[in-house]
Image (spheres, rainbow, N blue to C red):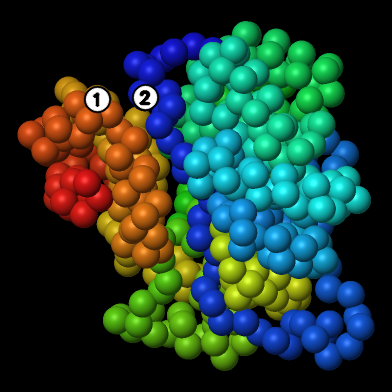
Amino acid sequence: MTQKHSSWTRRAFLKASCAAGAASAVSLKNFPAFASDEAVVVPTRPFGKTGIEVPILGFGTSLHVAFSQLLLKQAVKWGVTYWDTANTYMGGNSEKAIGKYFAKYPEDRKKVFLVTKSHAWTTRGLTRDLNLSLERMQTDYIDLYFTHGVWSVDELDAKTKRWAQNAKAEGKIRFFGFSTHSNMEECLLGAAGLGWIDGIMMTYNYRLMHSDDMRRAVDACFKAGIGLTAMKTQGGGQVRTDTATELELAGRFLQKGFTDGQAKLKAVWQNPQIASSCSEMPNMTLLMSNVAAALDKTELTARDIQLLRKYARETHSDYCAGCSDICESAVATEVPIGDVMRYLMYARSYGNHQKAGERFQKIPQKIREQMIHIDYTPAEQKCPRKIAIGRRIRTAIKELS
Ligand code: SF4
């Protein structure tokens, strides 16, 4: 695997997870099983050319061992059988929670499309991490194995390809791919030309999905038979009710019986090229809310989409699009600007201060100390969203240190 940047910029310190799920309101009308014995199963789609059907709603699992078992059982019952985790989530406890579940319900292993990830940037590291994941999750194989937080497909070289082929031949993984929340469009386009990537999970939501670059990249992957999973589908936090657009948006969706969070999921699902979406669902309320959205057959209208796009435009500068190549190349010192923006989003938009702080602390101390002294003006001038990068970096240092 090519070490394009120094080891830390390979994102060895990253433990990013899926976007938080939809907002907490639940449309009970979508749960006929509550009133009858009718089965509730989330719809499925083909995952690229793998021949596998996956549910449109994937379970982003940052789980506690003790509190997760009922959630996982219910997820299987409702057909939320695409489980995404990583060897680093919850310090390894997320994989252990899944292992505990499979030990208790071994018959469910075959029902689940199991995805995990490694930050390793050497093949030796990948082997070590894969074996540990297998052991923790008490399984002989991973359905889809990701290298985590890819920044450029240059990181995926011939050695990685050979490693993936060998792991498949050994039966330890069925498919191989990567996750990305930086420079997603370039990563997708590059992957479409490689010919050996089976699946990709990327930041994708109502804010990003309409750009020409993203459309082209998704289309190229779809045509190349790469299964696509959207993460960070909420594109920041809940819609507020401060402006006329926000009020209209929230009111409009509530009238239809769903929340803005559920609407954001629907916006993603309306692109049939997206096989699944990965939502972090740490409790039953969110699981129910997202399952309700997946079962609800109501499509967003052109006006709904138009309103979401208007809202996205009006809050353009609140949301970092992950195009880190642009801002990070504008400052002389290597600073993971895009990552810091994302950690701030975890804290401020999703209220997950613990996760944000943990991620931030993984940035090497030397770099954290340098961050405060850097002039971010050139990066701000280049940022297409005109984000106040310097101010946000100072906020992150203050709030996440
Ligand atoms: S700060 Fe601006 S340039 Fe940097 S990743 Fe975010 S949106 Fe892109």
Residue at point 39%, 85% (across, down)? 247
For residue 364, side relative to residue 294 (left or right): left
For residue 185, side relative to residue 69 (left or right): left
Tell me the number on the disc at residue 199: none
Q: Which of 55 and 133 is in front in this view?
A: 133
Mark 2 residue crowding within 10 angstroms, few (<14) / some (14–19) / many (20+): some
Marks 2,1: beta carbons within 8 A: yes
Q: Can residue 269 be seen at all in this image of the molecule?
A: no
> Which image quarter: residue 246?
bottom left
Mark 1 residue CB less than 8 A from any atom of ligand 1: no
How far across and how far down the image is residue 248, in percent? 43, 85
Q: Which of 228 and 217 is in front in this view?
A: 228
Q: Nearer the viewer, residue 132 or 293?
A: 132
Residue at point 50%, 42% (across, down)? 91
Residue at point 30%, 40% (across, down)? 361
Q: What residue type is labelled 1?
A: Glu
Indicate which disc, 2 or 1, sits on the residue closer to the N terminus.
Answer: 2
What is the C-alpha distance between the residues marked 2 and 1? Answer: 8 Å
The quadrant the N terminus occupies is: top right
How far across and how far down the image is residue 101, in percent? 75, 52
Q: Is mark 2 on a helix, strand or loop?
A: helix
Q: Mark 2 points at which residue?
A: 9
How far across and how far down the image is residue 60, in percent? 61, 53
Mark 2 residue CB less than 8 A from any atom of ligand 1: no
Q: What residue type is labelled 2?
A: Thr
Mark 1 residue crowding within 10 angstroms, few (<14) / some (14–19) / many (20+): some
How far across and how far down the image is residue 295, in percent? 76, 73
Q: Is mark 1 on a helix, strand or loop?
A: loop
Residue at point 30%, 81% (across, down)? 243
For residue 91, side relative to residue 376 (left or right): right
Q: Name the residue under label 1.
A: 334
> Which image quarter: residue 323?
top left
